[in-house]
Amino acid sequence: MANPVIFGEIPGIKEGQHFKGRKEMMENGFHRIWAAGIDGNRNEGVAAIVLNGGYIDDQDYGDEIIYTGVGGNSPSSKRQVDHQSWDITQNAGLKRSMTEGLPVRVIRGYKHKSPFSPTSGYVYAGLFRVTECWTEEGKDGYDICRMRLRYQGDNDHTHQEVGDIDAGKNSERNYRTSTTTSVVRDSHVARLVKAMHNYTCQVCGTTIKTAEGYKYAEGAHIRPISDPHKGADNLGNMLCLCPNHHVMLDLGIYSISDGYELLGEMTGKLNTISKHQIDPENLKYHRKSHGYDRT
Amino acid sequence: MANPVIFGEIPGIKEGQHFKGRKEMMENGFHRIWAAGIDGNRNEGVAAIVLNGGYIDDQDYGDEIIYTGVGGNSPSSKRQVDHQSWDITQNAGLKRSMTEGLPVRVIRGYKHKSPFSPTSGYVYAGLFRVTECWTEEGKDGYDICRMRLRYQGDNDHTHQEVGDIDAGKNSERNYRTSTTTSVVRDSHVARLVKAMHNYTCQVCGTTIKTAEGYKYAEGAHIRPISDPHKGADNLGNMLCLCPNHHVMLDLGIYSISDGYELLGEMTGKLNTISKHQIDPENLKYHRKSHGYDRT
């Protein structure tokens, strides 16, 4: 495949759009490789997946999908006949998408059994994020690669349990508990700032790396974007930080001078690069918010 | 005050319960000090607050409250006549409740103007968590101590903007973005495990401390509690970690042997204490989930 994987929204294709068949979707890079179901690879990450009834362990709750990786599957029976492995490039790519916070386009096909599936053809379900990867024993007794995908868009989806033969057992599932997840979901700007700094914390120089070499960092807003702060979600208001220094920034344990010196409980200087310009107004806002600039 | 501050739910008092007057609420430690509006202090944290129209900058959105600290306020006019400070014990206590993840009981009084307020007396609105503290200039031109409180219970509240004279301006507020907050909200068990380990990371020994000496750590589930993992929310399934080692545990960058050796990208041993017993089944589940136990 010479063409690179294309991440995020594709111009002209909206969430909810219907496609009659596979060919229509391949034209503009929306989903390039149909045979695999997963468009992506270990080096770039995965940009799109199709749910189309190929794996019996898949579960679809609308805004949350428990997805099964590729491999070990009999195309005729759809059953697992062998273990899956994270060494397979598509599975590794989904792990990369998780670690680096890349968006994944989800497409539901007519063979996928869920209330969210089309009766014919395919439907674009919107952007999701891989929030968790793990190995478990599937229904056929073989290890399978599993991923949790969470919807990232603004449309309401009924969070309904389907496609699971044990549905009755799970009526007590508590989604509120998922707020304790520690991996931070990022915006497009956050992905950009992390890539610019090569996932290295601008405060301590730490890079969190997986065994596969994938990197994790967080995009941290200097001036919070929530009300009443109304900070901008742009590069001038964002730092690339490790989780510890993200929490500490949010708690005001340190702040940053206009000359990028670390203030408060920290010493030293913020690591900066010329192509990433920070707006001094945001630094000033943070200092004021946390008592570093006294009037 | 000789009696200690009591955190969390009070037996016999349910969310939504109505109280005719202040005296009724003081009997069982539900809210001990009425004059202040804030029950708590810098050394223990704050366990309960009352919203009753005392501060013009307060904003109430139902499941989210932007609260104003105490001080600098004229009791007669309810206007700010001076700056507030985080040095005041109640304000410091709210910061402690944030850093250490303590639950705060919220009570709405009849003088508080919001659709969630009672027409007479007081209503217990449930448990909230302080998720953010900052200083800003209030409507009267003085610095005020501000806190964001988020509802932690299971009941639906209309997320509606009220009590803000600039309500029209804020129609574009985007709550989805609040998922990027880096401070993790914790369960009762998480608070317990953090206290047992004195907020010290069991992997690296780090303690994140504020200038006031308040500590931050995270309670991390070894076996995730979400479906399909269904891990228990108890001490045997919980570690006290810094945010970095929490993320790395969730990503499977390291795992832990039954003898508490760190596996994978880490070396060394988990710091354990005899009164905190970890269930080896949960360690096994984590190893299996992330490919450390090969079959």
Image: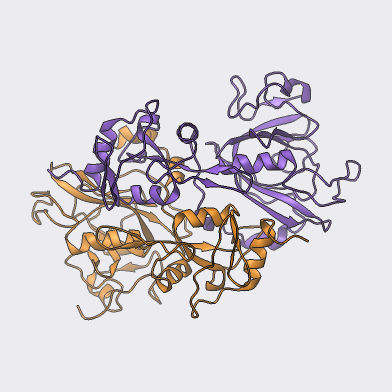
Chain colours: A orange, B purple
- Coordinates of residue B137 in the picture (x, y in percent): 76, 58
Viewed as shown, does residue A16 lie left or right of A111? right
Q: How many marks?
A: 0
- Residue A166 visible, this orientation: no
Instruction: Judge whether residue B68 can be spotted in this image.
Output: yes
Q: Nearer the viewer, residue B143 or B150?
A: B143
Residue at the spot x=58%, y=29% of the render? B8
Q: Residue at x 17, y 59 (%)?
A: A87
Whether residue A276 is situated above or below residue B49 in the rendered picture = below
Placement of A143 over or under A109, stated as above or below: above
Q: Position of residue B41 (x, y in %)?
A: 69, 35
The residue positioned farthest toward the front in the image shown: A267
Depicted B226 relative to depicted A68: above or below: above
Residue at the spot 72% in from the left edge and 23% down from the top edge: B25
Asked where in the image residue B273 lies, by quadrant, the reply is: top left
Q: Which of the 4 image quarters holds residue B102?
A: top right
Q: Quadrant of the N terminus of chain B?
A: top right
Residue nearest the observer in this picture, A122 or B82 = B82
Name the residue nearer the viewer: A52 or B267. Answer: B267
Location of the C terminus of chain B by quadrant is top left
**Viewed as shown, does residue B134 lie left or right of A74?**
right
Up-down relation of residue A101 to residue B124 (above or below): below
Image location (x, y in percent) of residue B103: 58, 35
Q: Is residue A23 left or right of residue B9?
A: left
Percent position of residue B256, x then y = 27, 41
